[in-house]
Amino acid sequence: MNIVHYRFFKGPNRYTLTSAAEVLVDLGPLANRASTEQEGFITRLLQSLPGIARHHCSRGHAGGFVERLNEGTYLGHVAEHVALELLFLGGERGVYGKTRHAFGDTVRVIFETETELGGGDAIATAIRLVEGMWNGEEERWISQIAQFADRLAEVRLGPSTMAICRAARRRNIPVERLDGDNLVRLGQGVRQHRVMATTSDRTAVTAIEIAQDKMLTKSILQRQGIVVPPGAVASNAAEAAAWAQRWGFPVVIKPLAGHHGQGVATHLANPAEVSRAFDFARSFGGPVLVEKEVPGNTYRLLVVGRRLVAASERIAPAVVGDGVHTLSELVEALNRDPRRGRGHAKSMTRVEIDGPALMFLSQQGMVPTSVPPLGQRVGLRSSANMSTGAVARDVTDRVSPALAFDAVRAAQAVGLDIAGVDVVTSDLAASLKDVGGAVIEVNAAPGLRMHLDPAEGKAQPVAEAIVDNLFGPANDGRIPVAAVTGTNGKTTVARMIGHILSRQQRIVGMATTDGITVGEVTVCEGDLTGPWSARLVLNDPTVEAAVLETARGGMILGGLGFDDCDVAVVTNIGSDHLGQDGIDTIEDLVHLKSLLIDVVRPQGAAVLNADDPWVMSMAVRSRGKIVLFSGREDSPTIGRHTAQGGDAVYVKRGNLVFTQAGRNFRLVGTRVLPASLGGMATMNVANAAAAAAAALAMGVPVRHVAKALASFPAGGEGMNRGRLEMLSGDDLKVLIDYGHNQPAMAELAALCRRLKARPVITVLGLPGDRRDQDLIETAGQVAVFSQRVVVREDHDLRGRRPGEAAELIRCGLIGAQMDPAAIEVELDEGAAVRRAILTSPPDALVLILYEQYRTVRDACQDAMNLRHHRQMRQEIHASG
């Protein structure tokens, strides 16, 4: 079996509302082989991965997949379930999966997964496992199962970051991972916060620098009257020993800028031990700190903001001898505890017999091959750090207010919003000063594992405390988000919504087919309506509201780029892009576009076109309320909806009207709308109704919506360029639009009739990735309202040969009974525009359906200027 194609969807997508992978797998010689055909295969599978026995599959109950195995299911389906089980063993909790035939011996496998790399590794490992189990290669699959979880842990979020993200989601705060490490965005736009493990955008760089310099930290704490042990920086072992003799043994030695317990040695009782410890600490680079060891137990006190939220006693790893096994064997047995793993992947870390361990063992007269007597406890580390295998005991409820105050003061003295304050004390019920305790370190980015899953005691809600400290009690970190989809009108509706919101003095981030804007600034140009664009807008910390045009292609290739929205607008559904990417019918297109309705928040709204039955069929999928819009005077669907108390924006007696709970509010006259070309462009009346409905559903007051619509321009170089953009010359008009499908041509035909334009000279090019029949039929519609057509070709041929799409367009025009003499072919877009304008008779309407706006706009200007000068010369010649 081979992976032919792999695609990862980060967030809601055409298959599921969670992150998932889509994989094309060529089954090769295992195609059409059922699970029952190989003796022992099912037994080996269930013995190696017993959790698979609990998979439901399509049966809807535990054990359903085993039933499928015993009935005989194909191996692509088995690989799907193995991938899901591997991810589950690695800590993920996805359950959705589906396998379907794609073509030939290739199947399409869909399964939930949190990460792109983890999902790819899971399916590749699953395929190897299935092949190995099929062939009975036992050693091969056992080692692969053992290794996969470790690899997955390297690409998943760390435990602290993961806990914070889960706490945020429980508060309905959006979460977005920003890189392959642990940088995460909580919230959106101007209301976001960013965290990386337990540092946040509120964590001061100066505080981190202070915490990393243990001597500087000690000095600052001392000046604040906080008890710290005597300490000094030693430049060599002799100097370290001299300090130890001055204060008296025992002492502690550690790197001045160390972390995770690296290079720390405690209980040093003589100069020889100090010398060895100094050399080891020095091996980590930088200066070395020597401190007087304070008697008592070591505790980690977690401070968030101005509050102690958890306390833990960390117990250094140790083994107990049995008189039979060596220390190495006892450590190996200790690491078999399922709670231990490599790094920070599990609640406890594996213990390694490394340099610090060997040094501490030597202090006890031991080596790894020593066999401790029965009952003898042998320590494996001199210091208790979670990163080196310590276990945690929760002591939060035992900490007195006085000691909590000491910890908070220490964190604030350093300047940390989140701090792990390490103290040594003999009594948690008293202040440090009262019992001779001390603060030994203040740590930036403290790990949360010891508090989330202690070996003893109860877990503490530390991640929730961090989220509460960042956002306060009622802030969900969200900005208003409107998403717009449909076949036609998406860009105009998105621009109208953006205009309405910006008139409220908000910085609006907007992604459309024309580019990405933040406020008045164009950040990127191009057709940017996919998930990457949505994330760019929502990541921007200046954006106060987002309007996201969401096109078919982006949904198919990458999903949405956001988990939910306040308002989803569906303008219309027409037969465009069929035959691409598995979207073959209108029903397929409806299912895909409904994804936007699926992610409407329960408090939000789905804004639907009342005059489009396909759009109205999506209403049942909305968790929010339904708001309808219509560009018609007599929509029966609107009538029924408003009669039942529903909200709607529609045309009534030449005005856009908003009905809410039975009350009517006049917005604006349809002829007053600049974008409606005096009421002639009814498609923009409907677009304005959609935009108004969206803005009203987002809480914009009626009067603000009305004023904003009345000021939204008709085309031009500004906010609605290239959409029904009318240019006036001396003796002709030019109309620029992006129409490129059959529904758009029908609307343009109606507009030309209302404008009473004649002749209409159309510059026509169509996207090459449409089906031949679509190009031919769309061209045929243009023939109905055009007296002459200049056929051009897109710069992006989209897989076509040069001239191929133009020839199909020409055939479509002729097939619609257009006179061949009225058809001209000029493949270059700019040249086609200039020819149409320069050769049109007076009073003509030149309709330009463009691909590249700037090319067309420049060509229009050049040709209209040339036409003007030519006309001026003719008038001068006639008068002379």
Image: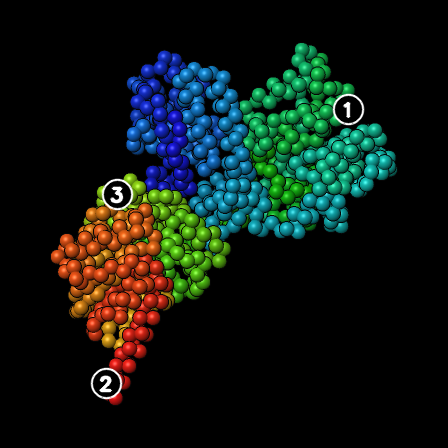
Q: CA distance from mark 2 to mark 3?
A: 57 Å
Q: Secondary structure at mark 3?
A: loop
Q: Could you tell which of marks 3 and 1 lies nearer the N-terminus?
A: 1
Q: Horizontal and vertical percent for residue 617?
A: 23, 46
Q: Could you tell which of marks 2 and 3 lies nearer the N-terminus?
A: 3
Badge 1: how crowded within 10 Å, few (<14), some, or many (20+)? Answer: some
Q: Which residue is mark 1?
A: 363
Front residue (pair 43, 349): 43
> Which residue sits at x=39%, y=44%?
558
Q: Relative to 862, is 114 on the left or the right?
A: right
Residue 233 in sight in this render? yes
> Which mark identifies residue 878?
2
Give the residue type that dot 2 points to. Answer: Ala
Q: Which residue is mark 3?
A: 579
Q: Horizontal and vertical percent for residue 92?
A: 46, 32
Q: Quadrant of the C terminus?
A: bottom left
Q: Could you tell which of marks 2 and 1 lies nearer the N-terminus?
A: 1
Badge 2: how crowded within 10 Å, few (<14), some, or many (20+)? Answer: few
Residue 254 in sight in this render? no
Give the residue type that dot 1 points to. Answer: Gln
Q: Horizontal and vertical percent for residue 723?
A: 30, 62
